[in-house]
Image (cartoon, rainbow, N blue to C red):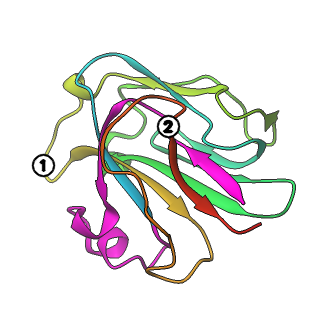
Amino acid sequence: MLQVLSPCPGRAFPITEADDPVFAQELVGPGVAIEPLAERTTVVAPVAGTILKLHPHAFAMATADGLGVLVHLGINTVKLAGAGFELLAAEGATVAAGDPMVSWNPAEISGEGITTTVLVVALDRPAGSLDSPATGDVATGQTLFEIDA
């Protein structure tokens, strides 16, 4: 089993309650939504692996076993064109779980239709396939959910 860790502190809740229908319907994959703390935060890698894609508002990783995990910082934050985000890693890099990826301050993120909900998704997995994902207050590095390797 692969443990997927929280990339930031906040309040975890079911991804099916996210304010975005694509994520809420688990079309990208099952996962957990996190309402982050409203303070400067370093978002970290939730798993060890290779950074496949790195954007200011999102990154996708693959583990050595080929499992994919997506971390999306906010909903509709792509509209900000990188404003308010600082990249701390490089696409193609191999990182350990807990390594810094992106710095941002959710308290400074705003705009039409934009929320700061962080989505952590197990890619290429069927909807509803996670057993007992975390809910409530989570710390950076705390297990959010496990996926079969």
- Say which residue appears at 75% left-offset and 41% top-offset: 48
Q: Can residue 119 be seen in this snapshot?
A: yes
- Answer with left or right where residue 1 lies relative to residue 143: right
Q: Which mark is residue 56?
A: 2
Question: Does residue 60 appear in the picture of this structure?
Answer: no
Q: Residue furthest bottom?
A: 126
Q: Which portion, as a residue range, is magenta?
A: 1-30
Q: Secondary structure at mark 1?
A: loop
Which of 96/78 is in front?
Answer: 96
Report x, y in % for residue 15.
33, 63
Amino acid on which the number 2 mark rests in the picture: Pro
Question: From the viewer's perspective, is residue 86 above or below residue 54?
Answer: above
Query: Which residue is at the far left?
Result: 112
Mark 1–mark 2 distance (CA, rounded to whole Å): 18 Å
Label disc, if present, on residue 78 of the rendered structure: none
Classify 10 Å Cα crowding around label 1: few (below 14), some (14-19), many (20 and above): few
Q: Residues within 10 Å of mark 2 (few under 14, many from 20)?
A: many
In magenta stretch: residue 22: yes
Sequence-wise, the earlier of marks 1 and 2 is 2
Q: Secondary structure at mark 2?
A: loop
Q: Name the residue tied to disc 1.
A: 112
Q: What number of labels is visible?
A: 2
Report the residue that reaches farthest toward the front. Answer: 132
In the picture shown, does residue 25 fall above or below 45?
A: below
Which residue is found at the position 59% from the left and 77% from the top?
A: 125
Asked which quadrant contains residue 26, the reply is bottom left
Residue 76: % across, % down = 29, 53
